[in-house]
Image (cartoon, rainbow, N blue to C red):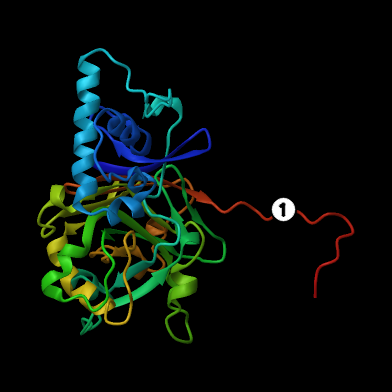
Amino acid sequence: MKLVHFQLADQFHFGMLTDSNEYIDLDTACRDYLGVNPVKGADPSRFRDMRAFFAGGADSVELTRKIIDYIDRRRKMGWTPRAATGARYLFKPEEGVQLLAPVTAGAKIYCLASNSRSHVAEQKKAAPRQPYAFTRFSNSLVGPSEPLVVHGAGQFPDIEVELAIVLGRRGKHIPAARAMEYVAGYTIGLDMGYRDLQYPAEGPVDWVMGKGFDASMAVGPWIVPKEEVGEPYPLAMELKVGGTVRQTGTTEDYLFRIPEVLAHLSRGITLEPGDLISLGTIAGAPGFEFGNESRRLKAGDRIEASIDRIGRLVIPVAAEAPPPPEAPGTARSP
C-alpha cells in the first residue's frame, strides 16, 4: 500500500497509488463504498489527508483494503469507478497527476544527526551518547514532483539518504517497549545541506543555515504502512547522483533505533499523528570532502534514492531563481 498526497488541476487529493500505477482518491472512493456498504459510525473524513488517516489507526488501513476490493469487484463487473455523485476517484499519471510530499502542513519534522556508525566514523567523531536531533520546517520540504533547490548563499551543498518514520498516534513519555505502536509507516528522506554554512570557519555548528534553506529536503514518494514493511532492520539503502553511487548500506548501521529515538524525543515533546522523524544517514556524505568538486551537488543533477520495501525517490536539482528586479525609482528600505 503506497499512501500519497497528489494534485491534479490544482486540486489536492489524499489517496494511494495502485500496483497498476493509478491514483485513487480515497475520500471520494470511501464515500462511494459506504453508500453501497453502510457501516454504522463510519467517518470518511479520515481520508482527507495523511494525518487524519493515521489518526484512524489500524481501522484506516483495514477500510482502505475493503475499498480496494470494492473497486476491483466493480471493474470485473465492467463498471467505471465513479462515485454515485458522478465524482471521479481514479486517475492516471498521464492526466497530469503531481505527487506532493506525503507530510501534512503543520507536522513537526525531526532529523537525527550522527546516527550511524559509518557516518560517525567518516566524521572522525565520537558517537553521541543519546539521540542527537535537529528540526526542520515546512519551507524546506519538497515532494516527488518538485526539485531540490541549490542556493548561492552556500558553496558546498551535499545530499544524504535517510529512512524516515511517520507517527500514527499522539503520545508523550513514550516507553521504548511500546514505541513501535506509535509508528504508522515509513518513507524516504533526502536531506540536503551546506557543510560550509553548517560548519563555519569560526563559531559553533549552525543547523539553521546549514539545513534550513527553502526546498532543501525531499520526502516521498509515498508512505508504506509499517505492517507491510515489517522489521525495519536491516533495510538496504542506496543513493545515486547522476547515476553514480554515493551511498550504500543498510539501516542496521543506525546507532539509535526507533524505540530509543521516540522515547528520547517524547520526554518533553508531545508527538502527533503525521509527525515525521528522519533517522539519519550512513557513510558517504560528500560534505566531508571539501574541495572535491566532483562531489558538489549542482543544478542539473538527478538524485535517486532507494530503500528496500519502500521504493525509489527520484528528484532533480535546480538553481534558485534570481530575485525580481527592482522597479525604477523604488527606494530601498533602510
The one of 27 and 314 positioned closer to us in this rendering? 27
Residue of label 1: 324
Residue 43 horizontal side relative to residue 210, left or right: left
The quadrant of the rendering that contains the N terminus is top left
The one of 110 and 255 positioned closer to us in this rendering? 110
The one of 179 and 201 positioned closer to us in this rendering? 179
Residue 12 horizontal side relative to residue 64, left or right: right
Instruction: Please determine whether, in this image, residue 80 is positioned above or below residue 153.
Output: above
Instruction: Please determine whether, in this image, residue 128 is positioned above or below residue 231.
Output: below
Is residue 39 among the parts visible in the rendering?
A: yes
The quadrant of the rendering that contains the C terminus is bottom right
Q: Residue at horizontal 14%, vertical 55%?
A: 235
Q: Position of residue 312 (x, y in %)?
A: 27, 44
Q: Residue at horizontal 68%, vertical 56%?
A: 323
Q: Position of residue 196 (x, y in %)?
A: 46, 72
Q: Residue at horizontal 21%, vertical 76%?
A: 263
What secondary structure is found at the residue carrying circle 1?
loop
Amino acid type for the residue under numbered disc 1: Pro
The part of the image, by quadrant, that contains residue 290 is bottom left
Q: Position of residue 64 (x, y in %)?
A: 23, 39
Q: Residue at horizontal 20%, vertical 48%?
A: 59
Q: Residue furthest right?
A: 329
Q: Position of residue 20 (x, y in %)?
A: 25, 27
Is residue 255 among the parts visible in the rendering?
A: no
The one of 317 and 32 positioned closer to us in this rendering? 32
Residue 45 horizontal side relative to residue 119, left or right: right
Q: Residue furthest front?
A: 40
Residue 213 horizontal side relative to residue 293, left or right: right
